Image (cartoon, coloured by chain):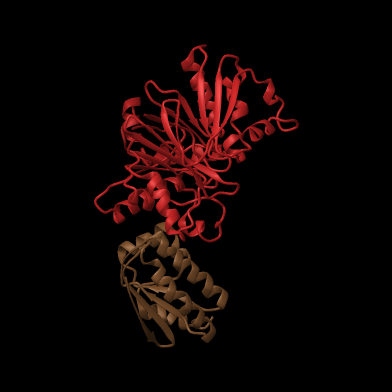
Amino acid sequence: MELTERRAGSAVVLAPAGRIDMGTADKLKERLLPLVSEAGKSGHGVVLDFAAVDYISSAGLRVLMLAAKDARAAGGKIAVAALQPLVNEIFQISRFDKVLPCHASVDEAVAAVEAKT
Amino acid sequence: MQVRFWGTRGSIPAALTARSVREKLIAALTHSSGQDVSTPEKAAAFADTLPFALTHTFGGNSSCVELRSEGAGRVLLDMGSGARPAAGDALRELKGKPGEFDVFMSHLHWDHIMGFPFFTPAYIPGHTIRIHGCHKELEHAFRRQQDAPSFPVGFDMMGSKREFVVLETGRTYEIAGYRVTAKLQAHGGDSYGYRFERDGKVLVYTTDSEHKLENAEETEGFIEFFRDADLVIFDAMYSLADAISVKEDWGHSSNVVGVELCQLARVKHLVLFHHEPAYDDATIERVWRETQRLEEITRDEHPVKVTAAYDGLEVTL
């Protein structure tokens, strides 16, 4: 799994590519959790661009759960964008579509995390 | 090896209500509009086209599963409320002859022991019941639930011969014609899974077991325990999202983790077990169909059959 990071507006966009499973989940965790923590302090949102993610296992979903909890505790926002159909089904079956806001595009997700509540 | 499910519900028995039956009937009749259901055969053929949850119920007894093999002893897994119908069936088959029962206990929570005071052979002289488990409080738990004021018949008033056998994990035993290995699982007060092997067939019974997903070594241990099993009976009580958030440390697992472990261990058949008591039949069927779909979309070259357990299900290995 490869990880790239970019800015979009005030949000940080983290884009994993490939499979997020037992062997790669820690790599995502090591990057994502500090990002969520920093974003919470600075008031910026985090968007996970999943356009290039082919598969996510329970170990990967657990990292997203930790990130969602941390974001909530820090008062930050996190969203997922551009899920491939297979990964979208995994989100629905595992009920992770109820844990994290899922958006059709990165632009839509960025707008959602930038929106004032 | 034949596996018979007498109780499949988690935590507490859950009865089907009159309202649920009526709703199923109304839905089935509505579907039957324009169909030829004029004979029992035609009606049965039509019923087979309807969703499982409309024409069946997954049942409401708590955990009890029976293993049968030609030339092997009678084995029961847990003594939930499903032990009551299991007892009736055994007595009908024994026709007055004395029987021997080897029971394996995952743990001693109430929903897993509550059927024993209604396990009729326990009251009849001549029958022998050996209760195996890994908890040192095994005998105490069974005795205590029949103490006053909880039950009117004390444990010592039962007429059968009853023995308690405390097993150790990591050892393989020969019991009732099966090679049996126990494994410690994450659950409040601990629980134990069992791997049964006979005649080249393997069954794994793993209920009330939480998988934390944060320890690769622990996961590898379960993959080895499940390795190449013909059937894995798996605690799939919650959704993954619930199991690792609001219900974390409640000691149960999910359908998603069941599929992953069975795929990694090259298991042939996964049976979803210990259903959430708050789920109605339609919800359990939805979880079952979603789990089949998950297995399909995440499969490599190894297919895993997925079934949702129901009271009355029989599987032959």
Asked whether residue A34 is in view, the answer is yes
**Horizontal side, residue B137 vs residue A3: left or right:** right
> Number of labelled discs?
0
Give the residue drawn at x 46%, y 83%. Answer: A114
Counting from the top left corner in percent of width and height, residue A71 is at: 52, 75
Of all residues, the one furthest to the left in this rendering is B301
Asked whether residue A102 is in view, the answer is no
Give the colour in which the image draws chain B.
red
Quarter assignment of residue A75: bottom right
Counting from the top left corner in percent of width and height, residue B266 is at: 31, 47
Question: Relative to the observer, which residue lies in front, B225 or B268?
Answer: B225
Chain represented in brown: A
Q: Considering only vertical position in the picture, is A47 above or below B298?
A: below
Counting from the top left corner in percent of width and height, residue B263 is at: 33, 50
Q: Quadrant of the N terminus of chain B?
A: top left
Give the residue drawn at x 52%, y 86%. Answer: A42
Give the residue drawn at x 38%, y 49%. Answer: B223
Question: Relative to the observer, which residue lies in front, B218 or A85?
Answer: B218
Give the residue drawn at x 31%, y 62%. Answer: A86
Question: Relative to the observer, which residue lies in front, B271 or B23?
Answer: B271
Q: Considering only vertical position in the picture, is B184 above or below B239?
A: above
Q: Considering only vertical position in the picture, is B88 above or below B242?
A: above
